[in-house]
Image (cartoon, helix red, strand yellow):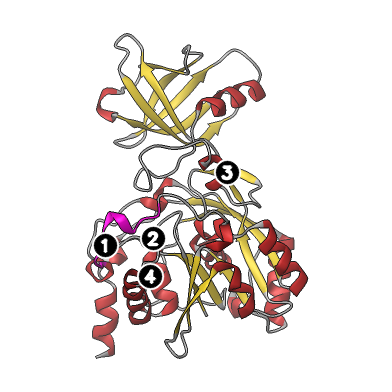
């Protein structure tokens, strides 16, 4: 029977639930910490309905919150193709070579963009780029053509870009999204998607945490577009995650490990923090300093050793984030909690409400 239970949870179809577009929050709450917070107790299955700012009531002095301080950059650019003038959109993924101004990008529509094509961006076509390689069906390597220093190039590039809010949240990006779609503690640039659980933390909430004596640590994982990539295999063991770059320095590893040794609770704020910590965890649940890439895919059954509690938003059906949350909280408990969330009108997605699993 147990074997059948594990088998069942390895299948994609087990992560579907009744979902409609109107469950997705198109805008955040006016105050970051006013989002709703569902608290799920693994030991009893009890569910509480709270407000996000109440989160600190569940923790004591010296407990440790671990955050991802990656910073989202304006990765989406509108441009046109030389000669035909056809509209194109590119999505900057990552910088490959600073001196040569080479970038990994996704292009849309991909079928019209070939090696050797020139593309132009900006109102006065201020910036050009040449397609120098195909990487995937939609992926290209671009060499940007720009007269000026690297700093001037970056400034011009980002001035033309827009906040990469997922299209399924809202079709049109608004100026306020630049602030909304960024955590208040974002520091190291490199993400094309925000670590959404962290969006709920306001300056006021961070101050209250400090007064209560709750400790914090920061790691960096640059969230990639693979975060939204759909799983297209029924057998989850065959799904390959895209790699994402992450950094856990010695100071961060040291303060997390000190909290663990003292028997304090360690709380992962979001799936990106959980993935980085579980990648860097060693024997005995201690965190090793690491600087590298992770494509770790966490789904049930999985033995977590890095964190004692987990904060995550309400995710879409069949998403790898939902699979990780279900692995941590317990498949049946989490899928039931999602059913309750729908009945209670919780908001899903990037700008939606959050769940705390204890």
Q: Earlier in the sequence, mark 3 or mark 1?
A: 1
Could you say whether the residue bearing mark 4 is in a helix, strand or loop?
loop
Q: Is residue 21 magenta?
A: yes
Q: Residues within 10 Å of mark 2 (few under 14, many from 20)?
A: many
Q: Earlier in the sequence, mark 4 or mark 3?
A: 3
Is residue 315 positioned above or below 164 on the image? below
**What is the magenta range?**
16-25
Q: Classify residue 282 as left or right of residue 20.
A: right
Nearest to the eye among marks 4 and 3: give it.
3
Residue occupying image coordinates x 49% and y 30%: 103
Q: Nearer the viewer, residue 347 or 191?
A: 347
Q: Is residue 272 magenta?
A: no
Residue 179 disc label: 3
Q: Residue 213's x, y, as percent?
A: 76, 73
Furthest residue to the front?
30
Inspect this view and state whether residue 254 appears. Answer: no
Residue 299 disc label: 4
Q: Are marks 1 and 2 in contact (CB under 8 Å)?
A: yes
C-alpha gap between disc 1 and disc 2: 10 Å
Q: Earlier in the sequence, mark 4 or mark 2?
A: 4
Is residue 49 positioned above or below 192 on the image? below
Mark 1 = which residue? 19
Q: Residue 153's x, y, as percent?
A: 60, 22
Nearest to the eye among marks 4 and 2: give it.
2
Nearest to the eye among marks 1 and 4: give it.
1
């Amino acid at each position: 029977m147990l074997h059948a239970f594990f088998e069942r949870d390895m299948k994609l179809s087990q992560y579907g639930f009744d979902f409609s577009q109107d469950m997705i929050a198109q805008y955040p709450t006016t105050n970051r910490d006013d989002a709703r917070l569902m608290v799920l107790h693994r030991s009893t299955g009890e569910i509480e309905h709270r407000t996000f700012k109440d989160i600190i009531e569940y923790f004591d002095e010296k407990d440790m919150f671990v955050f991802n301080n990656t910073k989202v950059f304006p990765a989406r650019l509108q441009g046109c193709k030389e000669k035909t003038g056809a509209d194109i959109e590119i999505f900057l993924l990552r910088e490959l070579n600073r001196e040569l101004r080479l970038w990994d990008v996704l292009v849309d529509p991909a079928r019209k963009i070939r090696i050797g094509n020139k593309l132009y961006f900006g109102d006065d076509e201020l910036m050009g780029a040449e397609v120098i390689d195909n990487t995937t069906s939609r992926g290209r390597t671009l060499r940007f053509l720009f007269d000026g220093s690297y700093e001037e190039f970056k400034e011009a590039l980002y001035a033309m870009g827009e906040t990469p809010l997922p299209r399924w949240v809202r079709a049109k990006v608004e100026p306020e999204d630049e602030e909304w779609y960024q955590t208040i503690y974002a520091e190291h640039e490199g993400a094309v998607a925000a670590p959404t659980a962290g969006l709920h933390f306001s300056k006021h909430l961070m101050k209250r945490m400090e007064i209560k004596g709750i400790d914090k640590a920061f790691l960096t994982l640059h969230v990639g577009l693979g975060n939204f990539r759909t799983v297209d295999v029924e057998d989850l063991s065959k799904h390959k995650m895209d790699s994402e770059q992450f950094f856990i320095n010695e100071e961060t590893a040291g303060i997390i490990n000190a909290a663990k040794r003292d028997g304090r609770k360690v709380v992962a704020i979001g799936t990106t923090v959980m993935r980085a910590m579980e990648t860097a965890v060693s024997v005995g649940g201690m965190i090793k300093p690491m600087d590298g890439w992770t494509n770790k895919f966490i789904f049930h059954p999985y033995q977590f050793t890095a964190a004692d509690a987990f904060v995550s938003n309400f995710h879409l059906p069949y998403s790898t984030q939902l699979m990780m949350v279900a692995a941590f909280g317990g498949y049946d408990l989490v899928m039931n909690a999602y059913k309750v969330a729908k009945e209670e009108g919780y908001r899903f997605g990037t700008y939606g409400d959050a769940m705390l699993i204890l």
